[in-house]
Image: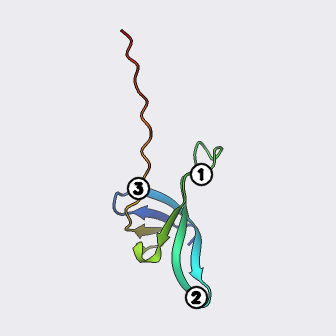
Amino acid sequence: MRRKEVINICDGCRLGYVADVDVKIPEGQVVAIVVLGPCRFFGLFGRGEEYYVPWGCIQRIGDDIILVDKPFQHPCPERRKKRRLF
């Protein structure tokens, strides 16, 4: 599962690759997957936010991708105020 890319079917964006799996130990039940966000500036400034995707939100698991159906809220970048020179 580590090499599978996770794609959100709500908006079609790529969330990243599976980094970890959350499992209940006594039952052996998979609860969720953890997806690392994309690298920032060639990996020099770390990664973006991590996504915790519950198992119930996973729609399909293919050979190379996992399709999830979960509306994620992406933070809006702050807009710079334009200076007007008169």
Residue position marked by numbered label 2 in the rendering = 28
Alpha carbon distance from label 2 to label 3 = 30 Å
Residue 85, image x, y percentages: 39, 12
Q: Quadrant of residue 42?
A: top right
SS class of the residue under badge 1?
loop
Amino acid type, callout 1: Arg
Quadrant assignment for the C terminus: top left
What colour scheme has been applied to the protein in the rendered image? rainbow
Q: Residue at x 41, y 56 (%)?
A: 73
What's the residue at 47%, 73% (across, down)?
Answer: 54
Question: Which quarter of the image is occupied by the N terminus?
Answer: bottom right
Q: Which residue occupies 51% across, 66% down? A: 52
Tell me the distance, in whole angstroms, between the alpha carbons under discs 1 and 2.
30 Å
Q: Earlier in the sequence, mark 2 or mark 3?
A: 2
Residue type marked 2: Gly
Q: Which residue is mark 3?
A: 73
Q: Amino acid at mark 3?
A: Gln
Q: Which residue is mark 1?
A: 47
Horizontal side, residue 68 vs residue 34: left or right: left
The mark tally for this picture is 3
Say few, some or many: other residues with alpha carbon within 10 Å of mark 3 (under 14 / 14 to 19 / 20 or more): few
Q: Looking at the picture, does residue 29 appear above or below residue 18?
A: below
Q: Position of residue 19 (x, y in %)?
A: 59, 66
